[in-house]
Amino acid sequence: MTERRRERPDDYFADWKEREALAEGMIPLIGKLYRSNNVKTYIYGKNLVNLSVLDIMQAHRFVRQVEKNELSEFETFPIIQALAALDLGTAHIDAGRIAVDYEEKGKPAGKSVDEYVREQVADLIGGHKEPARPPRDVILYGFGRIGRLMARLLIEKTGGGENLRLKAVVVRPGGAENDLVKRASLLRRDSVHGPFEGTIRVDEERQSFVANGVEVKVIYASSPEEVDYTQYGINDAIVVDNTGKWRDEEGLSIHLRCPGVSKVILTAPGKGNMKNIVHGVNSHEILDTDTIISAASCTTNAIAPPLKVLHDRFGVNSGHVETVHSYTNDQNLIDNYHKADRRGRSAPLNMVISETGAAKAVGKVLPPMLGKLTGNAIRVPTPNVSLAILTLNLNQDTTVEELNEHMRVTALHSPLRKQIDYSNSPEVVSSDFVGSRHACVFDSEATIVNGNTAILYCWYDNEFGYSCQVHRILEQMAGVEYAVYPAE
């Protein structure tokens, strides 16, 4: 990419107000594309649907910081305006990338913005706005940390309702009299991830809650065998089991015997011969005939993408993974009995040496790593966002600059850009990554290289980033696919 710099404005405030007005003008165009054409608009992978003016401006700023290039609202607004004027089929369109391509290729060739945009999406014009298949029902079995974040994602991405529809959550009976109200309240307010974006109402008569117009039945059951989902109008559903109670195919197959269920996703590492999938790394292994899939662990999702990238480029001979992991509900608030070593000690007061199976589990996802990695974990007194420290012996010497540049290009321009994000700030800390939708964020300022030894630091939102990875697997198992522009 050719490096470009805009001239410094004479009046920063006047320049800001102009760009602010353009970002405000983008919002109805982005909304029209999404609701009328099921087209999601992006800027370098950042989804612009339902963003505020300032969020849109921050997305532009990210490109300027990380891509070492200017991308302003002055350049993207005409692109989005041209897209909104076309009759487009369902797709994901990166207006930021098209804007940069236009500046580098279209404008020098004497083409207008409208002409260049039409060329870029030519085979999308007049295309189908809805897939031929019916929408796929989704059931969340369990409504804890991951279950509620999955609910947020599914509701946010409902769109016109033609792809995935959250139809029900299943929880254990025996709660308080106002159990339904309490569970809806936990979805509405979250101490880590903030308030739910939208409205939630409770319909106790129908035993459901309605979030942004999506009605979700709350089913009380002690085990899957108790539920006939067809009685709730649910058919051919995918169950996302986030309880962790069953970890092998035999246990999870209980769900498949329930009327109305056809597939199951486990939000934990699967045991035995179950496929463990990290989306973007080995998701090509998912077959239409697969009925039970594991989404592996949050840590495996965080380390597998950068390990693949480094192994493909430099080769990884051996290494050690140390995860500095936020505490979880599995630990105790104050000292109390726990069957696992050390985890009985108070989570908010202690750093706790623990173990992680991710170093071994990554071999299931990335076979070249089998037997090459050791691993351990330290649980720390933070409620969310963890850090994986990869100490790797590479097959060739490199430098900090070479390794960082390879990761930067990967994060911005490779098929793994949804899995790997890139940070070049020397000031970031864990709370800055709450809400990250990537499997990990590569911290380039922390990289250490000594010959063929490299130490990498990768942040990850072990709750939301992981949930986004689960959602990507869910879409793939449901057959939800989008045309991507510009083509990868």
Image (cartoon, grey):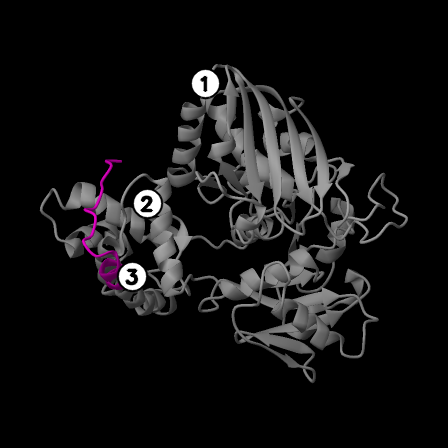
Is 431 on the left-hand or right-hand side of 174? left
Q: Residues within 10 Å of mark 3 (few under 14, many from 20)?
A: many
Q: Residues within 10 Å of mark 1 (few under 14, many from 20)?
A: some
Residue 317 seen in the current view? yes
Q: Which residues are magenta?
A: 1-19
Quarter of the image with the C terminus is top left
Residue occupied by mark 1: 398
Q: Quadrant of residue 287?
A: top right
Of residues 291 and 148, which is closer to you in this image?
148
Of residues 53 and 146, which is closer to you in this image?
53
Queried whether the magenta region covers residue 363, the answer comes back as no
Mark drawn on residue 64: 2
Q: Is residue 100 above or below residue 159?
A: above
Q: Residues within 10 Å of mark 2 (few under 14, many from 20)?
A: some
Q: Position of residue 347 (x, y in %)?
A: 77, 48
> Which residue appears at 86% of the width and 49% of the height?
335
